[in-house]
Image: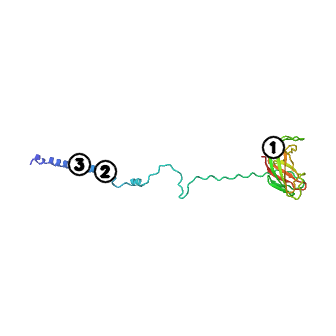
Amino acid sequence: MSASQTSAPAPRSRRAWWWAAAAAVVVAAVVLWLVLHGGASDAASGGGTPSASGSTSASAPAASTSPSSGPAATPGATQGPTPSPSKVAPSPEPSVSVPVPPIDNRKPTQAPAHASATSAGVTVRVTRFASVTTKGTGPGELSGPGVAVTIELRNDGSTTFDASAVTVSVYAGAAGTPLATVDSDPANAPVADVPKGATRSGTYVFRVTDPNAVFAVFVDLAPDAAPIVFQGLRLS
């Protein structure tokens, strides 16, 4: 047998191999296409096992994007306006004691501005302490800013009270400056005698140099009676 005769079947064998390889490539391509398109279909239809991150994002509640409205209210507590701080009452003005010079050895009775005080069976009260314009016509008396003081006397004794010895004085400020009397002023009307059980009033006029001062009214009823000092008066 010649060499050309023994090598003749070789081309057929090579063609069969190529066909088999080509078929394998086609099958592999088809399988790959099915795998890729099958996975895409599953993802589009929600199939398959969700990933851990997908499960977490799906189950977690959406975070609120609204602005914070403040701290949460305590359960059961009633919401309402914040109470304003309680108002504190102002402290009362401290009392001012105007110095009054002593009169012999009699100890005066101290009384608040418009209170009543009793001495020698007579009850005394300041019923008026007001700014006036004085009209001085007597020697050394001047017209100008002044104060009219009206006192009331009630006789609680058993006989008529002799008011001829009654004197009224006014002192001003921390220095206890005495005010000058204006006896010639027409408003002056000294108290008269007070019968038993009766009440009488008298008015006394003084010059004022400091209308903003605190004043003390000194009432001396008689040489044998304790004088009365009314403290803390102001001009009205």
Give the residue at mark 3: 26
Amino acid on which the number 3 mark rests in the picture: Val
Asked if the residues shown at circle 1 and circle 3 are in contact, with their CB atoms under 8 angstroms apart, the answer is no
Please report the residue visible at 19 percent of the width from the left and 48 percent of the height from the top: 19
Res. 111 in view: yes
**Residue in front for this viewpoint, 81 or 137:** 137
Give the residue at mark 1: 132
Asked if the residues shown at circle 2 and circle 1 are in contact, with their CB atoms under 8 angstroms apart, the answer is no
Q: Nearer the viewer, mark 2 or mark 3?
A: 2
Which percent across, then down, holds residue 128?
Answer: 80, 49
Number of other residues with Cα within 10 Å of mark 3, as a class: few under 14, some 14 to 19, many 20 or more: few
Give the residue at mark 2: 41
Tell me where residue 134 sits by quadrant. top right
| Mark positioned earlier in the residue sequence (2 or 1) | 2
Number of other residues with Cα within 10 Å of mark 1, as a class: few under 14, some 14 to 19, many 20 or more: some
Amino acid on which the number 1 mark rests in the picture: Val
Q: Nearer the viewer, mark 1 or mark 3?
A: 1
| Mark positioned earlier in the residue sequence (1 or 3) | 3
| Gap between marks 1 and 3 measured at Cα | 129 Å
